[in-house]
Amino acid sequence: MKKITLATLIALCSATAFAQQAGGFNGPSAQESQTQPAPQGGFTGTTALSTVKDAQTMKDDQWIMLEGFIDQRIDHDKYIFRDNTGTLNVEIDGKRWQGQNVSPKDKIRIEGKVDKDWNSVEVDVKSVKLIK
């Protein structure tokens, strides 16, 4: 009997949690008939723009956004990034370019995570955008 009661309780909790996470149609006519609250969004703020100099003092895995230039390629997916405060090694996987061609004359914005080792700092880039 205890097993059946416990199983029923778990099933009810799971169904309630699933119903709260489920999405649905968000068109104009759905607003009147919608019985559950609208799905929750995520973070809408922005990451503050940092500099290469700032990156040197940031913590490992901290999110960073930089604007500057790629000076040169030093390995398969490693590059030297430059802004007006210095240079920094960055790792940019091929899929992060999203078909964009960038030269050392093109100003870009990169976003990613600071990757600190014992005596080096680089950025693992998650997004590359040309600034026009």
Image: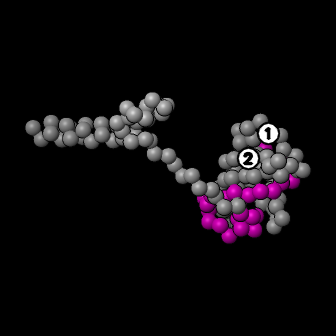
What amino acid is found at the position of numbered circle 2 in the picture?
Val
Q: Quadrant of residue 54?
A: bottom right
Distance from the alpha carbon under mark 1 to that under mark 2: 9 Å
Q: Which residues are magenta?
A: 50-76
Q: Quadrant of residue 6?
A: top left
Side of 48 relative to 22 (left or right): right
Q: Is residue 123 visible?
A: yes
Residue at horizontal 64%, vertical 58%? Answer: 47
Q: Secondary structure at mark 1?
A: loop
Of the pair 33 and 10, the residue shown nearer to us: 33
Is the C-beta separation of discs 1 and 2 under 8 Å?
yes
Q: Which mark is residue 113?
A: none
Look at the image and say whether residue 67 sits in the magenta stretch: yes
x and y percentages locating residue 86 in the rendered image: 82, 65
Q: Earlier in the sequence, mark 1 or mark 2?
A: 1
x and y percentages locating residue 5 in the rendered image: 15, 39
Q: Quadrant of residue 99?
A: top right
Disc 1 target residue = 100
Residue at horizontal 69%, vertical 57%? Answer: 65
Furthest-right residue in this view: 105
Disc 2 target residue = 128
